[in-house]
């Protein structure tokens, strides 16, 4: 039988979601916990992969097992067994062909930039002390909707078959001394959000014009885009699935 897990994690201590040969990942820690509690080797498949230091307020993964267990009881045991920076919210059975990655309709991220030094928030936002033109950055967001190919924001030497993404939402808001970027798309390339934010900071500083922003995307060249911002300001906040997958029996 196949099950979905909904979880969240603080990415500070992890080298991203996906298993790594020489570093600790969220996937590795969760697989070990599940395997221990269910007393069989469990492999999990996540809805996507986050980079080192990136946080997730909502992540989904699936796993297969024929072991009989109480979903509520396993959720409780996992939360007791796992470290404090990983939390399990729900576990529910799905159809055998449901897939955490391929069935996801969209993913949403936010990126937090602190415009002042904050001793309580430095692990969870990017401290940037120069003033930013948020209106100009929002004009750049509208440019994103005009394109599909975002190779210029993708990590080099990636093995994807296409660089096309359908971005359906993107925008900046200023909340006191915090500037927050939100973006939603059907899929994201590796490093894409951090590269977009880094490039838009250049727009906000007046170093890149809207015309140049168009040129960067059209060039399909990562070297033309801005520097990627640090991972600790990035959060995966929502993953949408078809209703029939997330419908939990009452």
Image (tube, rainbow, N blue to C red):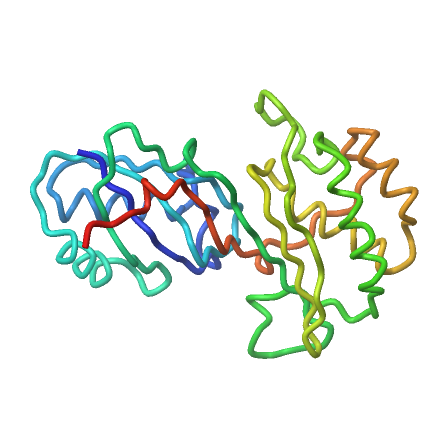
Left or right, residue 139 beside residue 198: right
Q: Is residue 242 above or below residue 174?
A: above
Residue drawn 48% across and 53% down?
238
Q: Position of residue 180 (x, y in %)?
A: 66, 64
Residue at the top extreme, as displayed? 161
Left or right, residue 99 beside residue 64: right
Q: Is residue 132 above or below residue 159?
A: below
Residue at the left extreme, as displayed? 68
Q: Position of residue 128 (x, y in %)?
A: 74, 67
State which quarter of the image contains the N terminus.
top left
Q: Position of residue 11 (x, y in %)?
A: 46, 56
Q: Is residue 164 above or below residue 7?
A: above
State which quarter of the image contains the C terminus.
bottom left
Residue drawn 45% across and 46% down?
240
Residue drawn 79% across and 30% down?
221
Residue drawn 24% across and 29% down?
96
Q: Is residue 183 above or below residue 35?
A: below
Where residue 67 sits, quadrant-wise, is top left
Left or right, residue 147 beside residue 108: right
Q: Position of residue 44 (x, y in %)?
A: 30, 37
């Amino acid at each position: 039988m196949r099950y979905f897990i909904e979880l969240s994690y603080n990415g500070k201590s992890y080298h991203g979601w996906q298993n790594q040969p020489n570093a600790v990942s969220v996937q590795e820690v969760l697989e070990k916990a599940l395997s221990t509690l269910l007393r069989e080797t469990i492999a999990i498949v996540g809805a996507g992969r986050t980079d080192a230091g990136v946080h997730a307020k909502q992540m989904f993964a699936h796993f297969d097992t024929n072991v009989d267990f109480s979903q509520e009881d396993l959720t409780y045991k996992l939360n007791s067994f796992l470290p404090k920076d990983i939390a399990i919210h729900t576990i529910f059975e799905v159809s055998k062909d449901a897939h955490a990655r391929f069935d996801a309709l969209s993913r949403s991220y936010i990126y937090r930039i602190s415009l002042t030094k904050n001793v309580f928030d430095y692990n969870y936002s990017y401290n940037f002390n120069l003033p930013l033109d948020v209106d100009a950055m929002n004009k750049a967001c509208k440019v994103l909707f005009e394109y599909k190919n975002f190779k210029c924001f993708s990590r080099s030497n990636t093995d994807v078959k296409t660089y096309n993404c359908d971005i359906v939402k993107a925008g900046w808001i200023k909340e006191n001394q915090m500037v927050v970027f939100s973006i939603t798309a059907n899929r994201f390339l590796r490093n894409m959000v951090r590269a977009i934010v880094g490039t838009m900071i250049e727009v906000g500083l007046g170093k890149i014009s809207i015309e140049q922003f168009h040129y960067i995307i059209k060039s399909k060249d990562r070297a033309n885009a801005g520097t990627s911002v640090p991972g600790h300001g990035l959060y995966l906040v929502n993953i949408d699935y078809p209703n029939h997958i997330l419908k939990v029996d009452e």
